[in-house]
Amino acid sequence: VAAVAADGRILRRARFETPPRPTPAQIVHRIAAAWSEVVEGLAAADRPAAAGLAAPGPADAPRGVLRQAFDWGWRDVPLAALTSAAIGVPVQLDNDVNACCLAEMRFGAAAGVQDFAWIQLSTGVGGGLVCAGRVYAGAAGLAGEVGHLVLEEDGPPCACGGRGCLQALVSGPAIARRYAERTGGAPGAAPAVFAAAADGDPAAEEVLQAVARDLGRGLALVVNLLNPALLVLGGGVMESLQARLPAVRAALRARVIGQANREVAVRRSAVGYDAALLGAAVLGTRSAGQP
Ligand SMILES: [Zn+2]
C-alpha cells in the first residue's frame, strides 16, 4: 500500500504479509491497517482522495469485482466496495497485470506507445495487452494470458492444467526443473541455475539458451497476432535473462512475418518491482475523476 504523487514518486508505503488462503475480510482488514499507516504519515495536502487496487486475478473493473483469485480460492468478490467502505475513499479495481500496463504507459518504458504487450516472467508468466492506447481485457477479463500459449504439444505440465505452455518452459520453477532434468539432480531454484551458468557450468548454459529460444518463440506468437510496436519484459526471471536478450530477439525475429514485426522494440520494464503498485495509483486517479 502506498501514497503516490502525480509524477509517480512513492511518498510513503507500508507492507503486509498475505496469510495463506486469506478471506476477503482478512485482506481488507490488512489493507485498511496499512492504508492508515501510510496516510497518517502524510502532510494533509498529500492525503489521497481516492485509491486504486491491483488485484491478483481476472477482474470486472467497471463493477469493481475480483472475478477469481486462483491462489486464494476466491470467486466474484466485490473487493472495490469492501475496500472503499474500510478506507473511506472511492476505490477503482483492476487486474494486477492490467495495472502494470497502465504504470508502464504512464511512468515507464511504454510512455507514448499505443500498441504494446507487457510480459512478466517470475514464478509464473503473465501478460497484458495495450491496443490503440487502451488495455485490452477481453470479453471476460482474460486476455493477455501469454504464459499459456502452447509451444510444445505434450510438453511439461503447466499450473493451468495444460501442457507445454510458455510458462511451463521459461518461468523460474520451469528453469529449475529443466536444469534438474538435464543434470539428474533435485530441482532447486532458478537463481542457482543462473549462478551456475555464470560459473561456466555447460548444462546450465544449455538450459538458459533453450529458455531464451523458447521465450523468443513465445513472443513471436504474440507479435504475429498483434503487431505491437513494443514488447515490455519485466519480472525477476527477466532481470536475470537480460544478458540473453540478443538470443531472445534472434529467436523472435526468425519466426515473425513482415518487416514491421521484425522491427518490434523489446525493452525491459522501467517500473520494475513497483509496477502493480504504480498502476494501482493510476487506477486511483481514474476513480478521482482525473484523466
Ligand atoms: Zn498453462
Image (cartoon, rainbow, N blue to C red):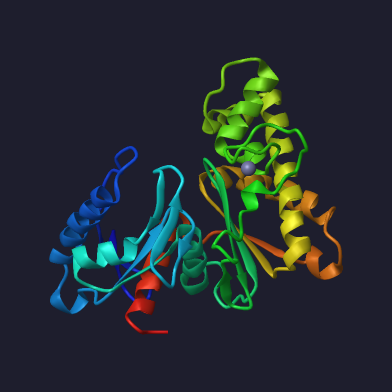
Q: Is residue 71 above or below residue 38?
A: above
* Direction from residue 45 to residue 120 in the image, left or right: right
* Quadrant showing the C terminus: bottom left
* Direction from residue 6 to residue 103 in the image, left or right: right
Quarter assignment of residue 209? top right
* Direction from residue 273 to residue 52 in the image, left or right: left
Quarter assignment of residue 19? top left
Q: Is residue 173 above or below residue 59?
A: above
**Residue 118 at x, y percent in the picture:** 59, 60
**Residue 127 at x, y percent in the picture:** 58, 56
x 77%, y 53%: residue: 252
- In this orientation, does residue 8 appear? no
**Residue 93 at x, y percent in the picture:** 39, 66
Q: Nearer the viewer, residue 247 or 17?
A: 17
* Direction from residue 131 to residue 63 in the image, left or right: left
**Residue 241 at x, y percent in the picture:** 61, 44
Quarter assignment of residue 224? bottom right
* Quadrant showing the N terminus: bottom left
Q: Quadrant of ligand 1?
A: top right
